[in-house]
Image (tube, rainbow, N blue to C red):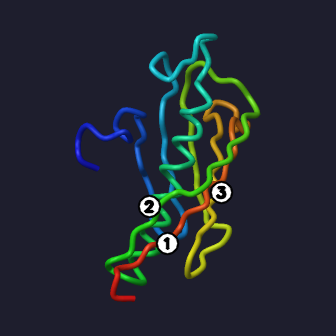
Amino acid sequence: MPPGTFVEYLGLDLTEVSGQRVEAHWTAGAKHHQPYGIVHGGVHCSVVETLGSLGGAHWALARDPGAKVVGVNNNTDFFRAVSEGELTSVGVPLHQGRLQQLWLVETRSDSDGRLVSRGQVRLQNLYPESR
């Protein structure tokens, strides 16, 4: 990723990126907080959108070098409040079709492995005009 991207701001360390799995490690901290001192739900949604989009783009590009993907729906549930600490987020596809993909992303605490958030992002596959 080029410097200055939103991924960089979130602090995501992408350790695996493919069309079948995306993994990122990140450290929750004050820059991610909402007013009550816990990680803002929008941060969790952003992680879901980011991992799903990266994996979906890799999958689509392997099939058509001109393909792009855009998010059309993001639904994220929050199970456990986190203020700080190491987290691991993993995204896997639930569906990969000609027009759309659905990716599931779970974030877990590295200290105890408990589920922090779980979301899915639906992606629209876009192809060059020649199709």
Dots 1 and 2: beta carbons under 8 Å?
no
- Under mark 3, the amino acid is Leu
In-image side of 96 versus 66 (left or right) = right
Identify the disc placed on residue 104.
Answer: 3
Real-space Cα distance between discs 3 and 1? 17 Å
**Label 2, residues with CA under 10 Å away: few <14, some 14-19, many ≥20:** some
Dot 3 falls on a residue whose secondary structure is strand
- Under mark 1, the amino acid is Asn
- Under mark 2, the amino acid is Val
Real-space Cα distance between discs 2 and 3? 14 Å
**In the orientation shown, which residue stands out farthest toward the front?**
129
Q: Earlier in the sequence, mark 3 or mark 1?
A: 3
Q: Establish if 75 lies above or below 91.
A: above
Instruction: Report the residue marked by disc 1.
Output: 125
Instruction: Report the residue marked by disc 2.
Output: 17
Residue 88 x, y percent position in the rendering = 56, 42
Residue displayed at 65% across by 47% down: 106
Dot 1 falls on a residue whose secondary structure is strand
Dots 2 and 3: beta carbons under 8 Å?
no
Q: Nearer the viewer, mark 2 or mark 3?
A: 3
Residue 100 x, y percent position in the rendering = 58, 72
Residue 37 x, y percent position in the rendering = 60, 12
Q: Quarter of the image containing the C terminus?
A: bottom left
In-image side of 70 versus 119 (left or right) = left
Residue displayed at 48% across by 29% down: 27
Residue displayed at 68% across by 47% down: 75
Residue displayed at 64% across by 30% down: 111
Of residues 118 and 122, which is closer to you in this image?
Answer: 122
Q: Nearer the viewer, mark 3 or mark 1?
A: 1
Q: Earlier in the sequence, mark 1 or mark 2?
A: 2
**In the orientation shown, which residue stands out farthest toward the top?**
36
